[in-house]
Image (spheres, helix red, strand yellow):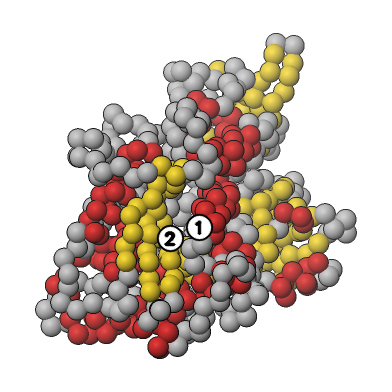
Amino acid sequence: MPPRAPILASLWKTTAVTCPAEVSGYTTCVLAHHDADSLQKGSCDKEFKALKHCFQKLLELLLSAAQSNRHRLSHLPPLPPPTPSTLSSLSLDVHCAHMTNWNPGGADETDLKSRGIAPAPPPPSAAAAPRPNSSSRLVCGDDLYARSLEVYSHLQGLSTPRFSLEPSPCLSPIKRLQFTSAYEDNVFQPFLADLSQPTIKTPSPDTLCNRFVKFGELKKYADENEYDCLVTGHYASLHHPADVSLPPELSPALDLRKDQTYFLARVDPDNFRGVVFPLAATIKSVASPAPPPFPPSSPCIPFAPAPQTTRSLSSAYSLPSSATPDSTGLCFIPTRSFPKFISDHLPPPPPVCRFVCVDSGETLATQKIDLDANPNRNPSILTIGQTIAVGGLPEKHFAVRRSVEVGGEGSELVVTVARGTLHPALFVDEFYLEAGSVNWLGGAEGARETVEGGGRWRGVCRVRHGQPLCGCEIWLEGSRERVCVRVDSPMRGVAAGQVCVLYEEEGGMCVAGAEIAASGESYHERGLQLETQPWSSGENDRTNERV
């Protein structure tokens, strides 16, 4: 009897705008078969050979991931090594899953347990599954599930191609998994608590979602139901060592513009056992390729680059999600303004905001906070370096810090601002991580031993998704309670609550991730000017948003 490898393929990676083009467009389609008719005439054989090679490497990766997972699930028998005969006789049983994590109305009224399963209803009609538009401000779980059902139903209806890839897998019914309680408790409420602080704290809820929900609750569900592999559409790479006692190693994807290692760096490395990211060697679209930080032969990329982009594969299979826009921002704020949405969930701010110049200490302006009249202008949720309109002054000002002061006439919000985007008050070259909160990843034993042994480790880091990697040095402070990170170039807008992710200088492997506990003194506080070129904040810098 051929070895069985049950696989749970997530049709939804908890982004509230993009339909599940990634996993369904690449993983499931490639696992199912290759549609020769979708290829251009004359290139069929070349494309098929390339895809077949990619598929063979994917099978090897699935098997090595399954072996790593079964080392932890010791009650399951080990799988055979990935030999040609083993791969050809492997039985693939693919189960598709949709995760419902966010409920716009708050906690579920019905008893939806953290790992409960709702049976999949018949695919809804177009009238029963409205698409988001200007009048539909929030996308609810049922709408998103309807989209996954569209993709799944389309996959089931694919015509048999002229040739197929072996082994041909079985596509089992879609599962709907409810994780709304876990998301509320571990992601959304901590996010609100951080934003409620009187001082600036800039949380990263997507890193918590990956840690506690996708590779927490979803991985727990997969293990409890004895799935060998969990396949998701993240743009990242996992290398499963031959020594199955070691956890997998996380590295950037080939498509660096879409790389999501920043959001995965706080996941328990043992929870990556059995996880496969087939998009590691896939470019999202023609516009997104970028040179990898490591050689193409590096084990960081577990198989050869795919012959087609994710977009082109999705389009070739006419998937409903093939033309949807890329998802950006927070997964629970799909179409609404961030300030308006957050203000609806936070306690009301003080009635008055006073803006103070960081250079002179003088009050530049005092204005009332009226969220009813200006719902998108809430200075109580500013982050460091964010543009802010100060009392109608023509010059651009940028937030440095905030506090709440209580006087005889009540409380007021005090926001210290700097004039000019390159003001020294916005830059630091040191910040701190709580030593106990550093999440050391697979393959990071050397770096961890160096730091915990009192030495200094040299690598590269980023504090925002999409930010270019910056050289850094880290070490334990004398109290051994904090890890100091010193970067080679001044960084703009570093705030507590952001996540710092560390990588090896060579090879690109992700070493660790941790929340920033505090930033060091700014250049302004140290009486210094910017004498070197400051480090880029990356594509996702929010300095152009006005409050």
Q: Amino acid at mark 2?
A: Leu
Q: Residues within 10 Å of mark 2 (few under 14, many from 20)?
A: many
Question: Residue at label 2?
Answer: 8
Nearer the observer, 407 or 99 = 99
The kind of secondary structure element at disc 1 is: loop
Q: Residue 240: which disc?
A: none
Left or right: 336 in relation to 209: left
Q: Is residue 248 above or below residue 115?
A: below
Q: Residues within 10 Å of mark 1 (few under 14, many from 20)?
A: few
Residue 276 pos. (x, y %): 47, 68
Nearer the observer, 89 or 459 = 89
Question: Residue at label 1?
Answer: 225
Q: Choose top left, top right, bottom left or bottom right for residue 364.
A: top right
Residue 547 appears in the figure: no
Q: Choose top left, top right, bottom left or bottom right for residue 123.
A: top left
The residue positioned farthest toward the front in the image shown: 1
| CB contact under 8 Å: marks 1 and 2 | yes
Q: Amino acid at mark 1?
A: Asn
Residue 103 appears in the figure: yes
Give the residue drawn at x 37%, y 57%.
96
Q: Earlier in the sequence, mark 1 or mark 2?
A: 2
Give the residue drawn at x 67%, y 71%.
444
Q: Choose top left, top right, bottom left or bottom right for residue 162.
A: bottom left
**Number of numbered discs overlaid on the protein picture:** 2
Residue 34 pos. (x, y %): 24, 73
Residue 506 pos. (x, y %): 59, 78
